[in-house]
Structures are given as structure tokens and as C-alpha cells.
Amino acid sequence: INPKKLGNRMKKHTTKKPSTPAKVVLVPQTKVLTPMDFLEAGALAQKNGIPMALMKPAKNDSDIQKYVKTIPFPWAMKVAGNKIIHKTDAGGIALNIKTEKDAVNVLKKFKKIKGFEYAVVQPMQNGIEIIVGGKRDPQFGPTVLVGMGGIYTEVLKDSSVRVAPLNEKDIDDMIHELKMYPILKGVRGQKSIAFNDLKKIMRGVSKMMVKENIAELDLNPVMASPKKVVAVDVRIIRG
């Protein structure tokens, strides 16, 4: 074998053309948003100084029988499940439940709702419905909202927002900016709501939005009366 020819053959098979650099495409990472369990969210809110109504889980009739002995009627019951976003739309809220039989029937109905995990039993709370919430804004960071609560929150849009953390002036200004403020203060001989309790809730939400890994927080409704202001529902999304 001619060494020169062999060398040429080896060169032909081993020499490669320069490869084209691979194109790197950077894909922006999106945060994973995870809804918290209802009772865990309530416990976290209480840990941060937010007064929450009593909440007890019920999965079966025996749970209902147990609560009859400790929770006075009337009750409120609501469905709980991480895949259930709007309880009202899902038919997962029942109010003014006055007997054990009615409670058992409500639980039976809730179990048919897609995403059902358990029902929450609470003593009924009276008062004006308020919303206190928080959201992590991409531009401003953690924010806090207070406004008219209940099912008409998104329709009437009576709310006030500030960037967290809130100071006492922020809290006072937010409350006074609401169109519903005169109602909260008391009209036609009605007493004012317990504003100190409402402020306590707003401080707690502000603290949570700054300290905790929370994308969204809703306390809706918060029931406000002259004696107390207490949150009866909570939704927290981590992220």
C-alpha cells in the first residue's frame, strides 16, 4: 500500500467541515401558581393576625353529627377543592342551614360537584360584605386591595389599592376612598362597623404579601358588623 495514498484516504475520511454553532433559544420561565388548600390558607391567615370565622371540614354524615353538638345553627356550608375556583358558580355555597337533616342534604349535593374534596362548616356571620385582597403585580410588586365584597365585587368595582407594605395612613386613606365608606360608618341611625378589626385584617394581608410567597390572596367576603369584622372565606395562590 502506498503510504502517500493511504494518508490521503485517512485525511479524506477524518477531516470534517466546521459545524455551524447551535442556535440557543432562551425560553422565559413562568412561575408555577399553586392554590392552597382552603383550611391551610385559613390557618396561614390566622397566623398573620387575620381573624377568621370558625372552619370545620366535613367529608361524611358522621362529621355533620359531630358538629351539631359544638356549632350552633344556623350554619353556612361551602365546597372545598383546589380545582374549584368560584364556589358560587359551582353551586357550592349554602346559607342559613338550620337542621342536621338540611346539612346532610347539602353535603350530599356538594359531593356531586366536580373537584369536591370536602365541605366546610361555619356558623353564620352577619354584616356588610367587604373584600380584602392582595396581588403580586409584575411592575409594582405586592399590592393590597380593599373594597365592596360578595358576588358583585367585579361588577361594582368599588375598591382602593396600594403598594405593600401599608402604613396607617395608607390604610385610613384606602377606607375613606371607598364609595361605600358612608355605609360602613353608619347611616340613618345605624352603628359604625368595627373599623379597628378591618384595619387589623388589612395589616395582616399587607404582611402576608410582603413576607409570604403569594401571587394572589382573596378574603371575600369579610363580614363587617359593629361588633366585629371577620373573614369567612379565603383563597390563596402560591407563586
Image (cartoon, helix red, strand yellow):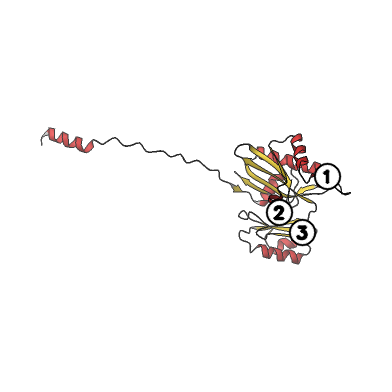
- The one of 84 and 20 positioned closer to us in this rendering: 20
Circle 1 residue: 185
As drawn, which residue projects farthest toward the top?
4
Badge 1: few (under 14), some or many (20 or more) residues near its Cα, within 10 Å? some
- Seen at 63% across and 58% down, the residue is 117
Q: CA distance from mark 2 to mark 3?
A: 19 Å
Residue at the farthest left position:
1
Where residue 204 sits in the image (x, y, percent)?
Answer: 72, 41
List the residue tagged with mark 2.
151
Indicate the secondary structure of the residue bearing disc 2.
helix
Between 120 and 146, which is closer to the camera in this rendering?
Answer: 146
- Marks 2, 3: nearer the viewer: 2
Q: Amino acid at mark 2?
A: Ile
Residue drawn at x 64%, y 51% as measured from the top left: 37
Residue 199 visible? The answer is no
Picture layout, residue 36 above or below residue 69: above
